[in-house]
Image: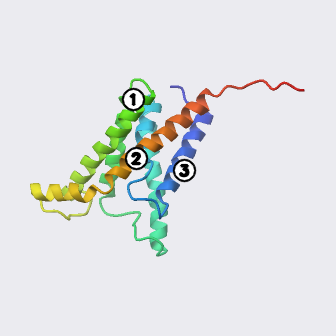
Amino acid sequence: MKINKSDIWVLVIMVVVAALYRAIPSRPFGFAPQLALAFFSGAILRDRKVLAFVLPLLSMFISDLLYQGLHSAGLSPIWGFYPGMWIDYAAYASVTVFGFFMKKINVLNVLLTALAAPTYFFLLSNFLTWTGLNGFDMYPKTFGGLMAAYTAGLPFYPYSVLSTVFFSGVLFGSWYFINHRSVKPVIAA
């Protein structure tokens, strides 16, 4: 897909809005647009793979800057930056690949990917938490410890699925609307 200058601005706005939304203190944990943004970027920018990976990571970074500022000001218990955050960024970036595999962008493919992406992310991120690679060594390295890590992540999973479906509709729908709008002539009365 050919990307022009105005498309870049639309993508930048999407990244910034997604970052701002993620940093809203009262939103339910797990209900954020970054997974949808990741595979959206992969689907829309499959010819520009570096940019496809950069957009969701940039959104994460901006929101983490906001989180860190709120935390430093004593307004949020959530840190923006923490040891091992690179592993979480890698997990988010890997979701971009889902968009590369969407051969055709249509409602069914977007919906199926919006269900698969958070499921994959849930399995991967909780596994990585269990390993301790992300800086939080909280679980014994046993099968029971792995199941405890997955159990601890369960409350976030439904919100992750719902938000990915919702924000995928918003992102792909907005992109379609913006790129398929037609200019209608104005007739003077």
Residue placed under numbered mark 1 in the picture: 109
Q: How is the image coloured?
A: rainbow
Residue placed under numbered mark 3 in the picture: 17
Viewer-proximal residue among 44 and 27: 27
Residue placed under numbered mark 2 in the picture: 162
Please report the residue visible at 41 percent of the width from the left and 63 percent of the height from the top.
80
Please report the residue visible at 48 percent of the width from the left and 38 percent of the height from the top.
169
Report, in whole angstroms, how far the alpha carbon at label 3 lies from the one at label 2: 18 Å
Q: Earlier in the sequence, mark 1 or mark 3?
A: 3
* Badge 1 element: helix
Q: Earlier in the sequence, mark 3 or mark 2?
A: 3
Mark 2 closeness class: few <14, some 14–19, many ≥20 residues within 10 Å: some
Quarter of the image holding residue 179? top right
Q: In front of the other: label 3 or label 2?
A: 2
* Badge 3 element: helix
Q: Position of residue 110 (x, y in %)?
A: 41, 33
Viewer-proximal residue among 91 and 172: 172
Please report the residue visible at 34 percent of the width from the left and 39 percent of the height from the top.
115
Please report the residue visible at 45 percent of the width from the left and 48 percent of the height from the top.
33
Viewer-proximal residue among 79 and 171: 171
Q: Earlier in the sequence, mark 1 or mark 2?
A: 1
Q: Looking at numbered disc 3 in the image, what kind of residue is underneath it?
A: Val
Q: In front of the other: label 1 or label 2?
A: 2
The answer to whether 137 appears left or right of 115 in the picture is left
Q: Looking at numbered disc 1 in the image, what kind of residue is underneath it?
A: Asn
Residue 18 visible to an observer of this rendering: yes
